[in-house]
């Protein structure tokens, strides 16, 4: 479905079969939406390019107000959260208290002081030309293509359009073909609020639509797998357009012997099994110091035993009776099974779960705790992105650090110790985009600070002023400093033709004295 304020559902030009969107917790068909290709993406980008001119020319406050109105409409819409819950299979709790809350907080942050300052002209004073000042102007880039994954239909999809739009760009969003309904609902709300046509559009489709965006937009913000992210970065590189690629992770949790083990175990279980483990910064592997390993593992098993897994009821906003929902993405179930089989074959013990839930109607995988994992096992090296938590015993902090950094990925992690200073020191030595100390996942909600991956986990960041300015093209205008214009012809006399020997002598002295 290509949704703008003027154009609703139209059949794709290629006649591609529609995308069938199902509720993964029940298997029930929710809706069919068109699968658009390159031709429709081209039309959307053209429309965006025209609409962006007026949107980019609006004052910051006008764009900020439009986004605030939209976010409030999403919060208050009776259809929005049920749609998100239905297509993702996650508990309403996670849809509301993680995704919706995050989007509101991000909007509050960016539409406030920090956002205004980040986009305001920045005046800098060069020391050697005291008659001049350099004005850095932040222009919108034009049309930003946002390509999102299926695990966070709001948080890693429309939410990444928020800074792009606020910076004055038009945004064309291509959600995953598994979870496009949340994005479509936002486009409907945008239209119903009377926000400018063409500035925000959603194009439903598969890889072809994503690929077309990389060929047509002025910037790409991609979140997804390393395989596709690399293709996106290559395509952007060939066109010399900026691309932020936020990719997979193998986030580590290091638990030192002096840590609060009860808290660490609860954190491991929450960060390992929230949204059935389909979270990029989730705890993917735990390294625990030998003396506390048995206790930690047994506490994790107890905590897992208390988890309530089942199908969320999308239309019940108030009952909280589920902790762990469904597997949104079918192939992720196969990944979990393969990694568990490999771990078993190499001698690991599967203490809980280990298989899909055949007693539930939809797609569910039982929360799985693996003890005695080793660094050779695939479950410790490849991204699981599912409800599987491997725990490995380590001799000491140094061994933990060596194993933690022995990964091609570097997205996130956490360090646990009774000494905050010791944990912080270790955190600084982790090769990771972000690290939490004695906590987990909260880094995603610290929207004031940049968040992104290193190594194979990506390029670029979201959040912070950095995350807003990257949606801008910078232009430096060097102009006369008020009150110092009289100096300009004098400086030019010495700098310009004809070159004079006395200027050379003078400048040589200057260079000796000052540098
Ligand atoms: P994919 O890379 O498979 O897909 C991501 C998006 O790219 C989808 O919309 C997909 O469309 C689209 N796409 C597919 N092919 C192309 C192409 N050739 N050109 C452009 N776009 C294309 O990732 P998943 O959706 O499976 O997401 C899971 C991954 O995302 C995990 O590795 C996870 O770690 C990562 N992730 C990273 C985060 C971070 O912040 N670092 C946050 C969340 C997830 P379609 O689905 O229709 O095929």
Image (tube, helix red, strand yellow):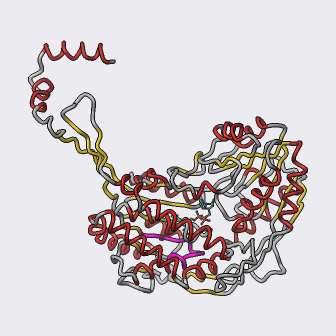
Residue 292 horizontal/vertical position (percent): 87, 46
Q: Which residues are magenta?
A: 172-184
Can you say whether 383 is above or below 387 in the image?
above
Left/right placement of residue 132 relative to residue 271 reads left
Residue 513 horizontal/vertical position (percent): 29, 14
Which of 356 and 510 lies nearest the eye of the viewer?
Answer: 510
Q: Is residue 182 magenta?
A: yes
Left/right placement of residue 117 relative to residue 281 reads left
Residue 502 horizontal/vertical position (percent): 13, 13
Can you say whether 100 is above or below 228 in the image?
below
Which of 496 and 398 lies nearest the eye of the viewer?
Answer: 398
Can you say whether 440 is above or below 40 in the image?
above
Q: What residue is rendered at 71% in x and 81% in y? A: 319
Q: What residue is rendered at 89% in x and 51% in y? A: 295
Q: Quadrant of ligand 1?
A: bottom right
Q: Quadrant of the C terminus?
A: top left
Quadrant in which residue 12 is drawn: bottom left
Left/right placement of residue 91 relative to residue 12 reads right
Q: What residue is rendered at 36% in x and 57% in y? A: 116
Residue 485 horizontal/vertical position (percent): 12, 36
For the image, the number of numbered tags is: 0
Q: Is residue 286 magenta?
A: no
Quadrant in which residue 284 is drawn: bottom right
């Amino acid at each position: 479905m290509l949704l703008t304020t003027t154009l609703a559902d139209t059949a794709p030009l290629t006649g591609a079969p529609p995308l069938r969107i199902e509720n993964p917790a029940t298997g029930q068909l929710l809706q069919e939406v068109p699968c658009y290709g390159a031709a429709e993406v081209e039309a959307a980008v053209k429309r965006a390019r025209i609409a962006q001119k007026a949107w980019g020319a609006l004052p910051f406050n006008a764009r900020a107000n439009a986004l605030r109105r939209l976010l409030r409409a999403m919060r208050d819409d009776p259809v929005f959260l049920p749609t998100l819950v239905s297509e993702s299979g996650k508990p309403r709790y996670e849809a509301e208290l993680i995704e919706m809350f995050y989007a509101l907080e991000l909007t509050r942050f960016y539409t406030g002081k920090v956002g205004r300052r980040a986009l305001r002209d920045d005046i800098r004073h060069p020391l050697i030309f005291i008659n001049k000042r350099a004005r850095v102007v932040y222009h919108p880039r034009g049309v930003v293509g946002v390509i999102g994954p299926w695990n966070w239909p709001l948080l890693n999809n429309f939410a990444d359009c928020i800074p792009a739009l606020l910076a004055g760009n038009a945004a064309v969003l291509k959600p995953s073909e598994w979870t496009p309904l949340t994005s479509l609902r936002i486009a409907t709300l945008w239209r119903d609020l009377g926000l400018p046509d063409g500035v925000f559009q959603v194009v439903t489709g598969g890889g072809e639509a994503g690929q077309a965006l990389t060929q047509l937009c002025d910037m790409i913000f991609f979140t997804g797998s390393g395989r596709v992210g690399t293709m996106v970065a290559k395509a952007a590189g060939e066109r010399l357009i900026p691309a932020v690629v936020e990719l997979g992770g193998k986030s580590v949790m290091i638990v030192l012997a002096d840590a609060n083990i009860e808290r660490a175990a609860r954190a491991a279980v929450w960060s390992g099994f929230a949204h059935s483990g389909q979270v990029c910064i989730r705890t993917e592997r735990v390294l625990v110091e030998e003396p506390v390993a048995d206790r930690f593992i047994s506490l994790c098993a107890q905590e897992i035993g208390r988890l309530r897994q089942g199908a969320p009821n999308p239309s019940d906003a108030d009952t909280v009776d589920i902790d762990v929902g469904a597997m949104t993405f079918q192939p992720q179930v196969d990944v979990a099974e393969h990694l568990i089989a490999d771990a078993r074959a190499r001698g690991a013990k599967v203490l809980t779960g280990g298989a899909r839930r055949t007693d539930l109607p939809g797609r569910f995988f039982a929360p799985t705790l693996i003890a005695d994992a080793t660094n050779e096992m695939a479950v410790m090296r490849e991204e699981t992105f599912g409800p599987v938590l491997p725990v490995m015993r380590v001799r000491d902090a140094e061994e933990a650090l060596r194993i933690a950094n022995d990964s091609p990925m570097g997205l996130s992690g956490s360090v646990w110790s009774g000494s905050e200073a010791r944990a912080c020191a270790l955190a600084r030595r982790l090769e990771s985009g972000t690290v939490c100390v004695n906590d987990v996942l909260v880094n995603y909600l610290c929207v004031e600070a940049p968040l992104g991956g290193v190594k194979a986990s990506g390029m670029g960041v979201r959040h912070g002023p950095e995350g807003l300015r990257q949606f801008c093209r910078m232009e430096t205008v060097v102009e006369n400093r008020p009150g110092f214009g009289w100096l300009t012809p004098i400086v030019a006399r010495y700098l310009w033709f004809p070159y004079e020997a006395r200027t050379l002598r003078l400048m040589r002295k200057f260079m000796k004295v000052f540098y």
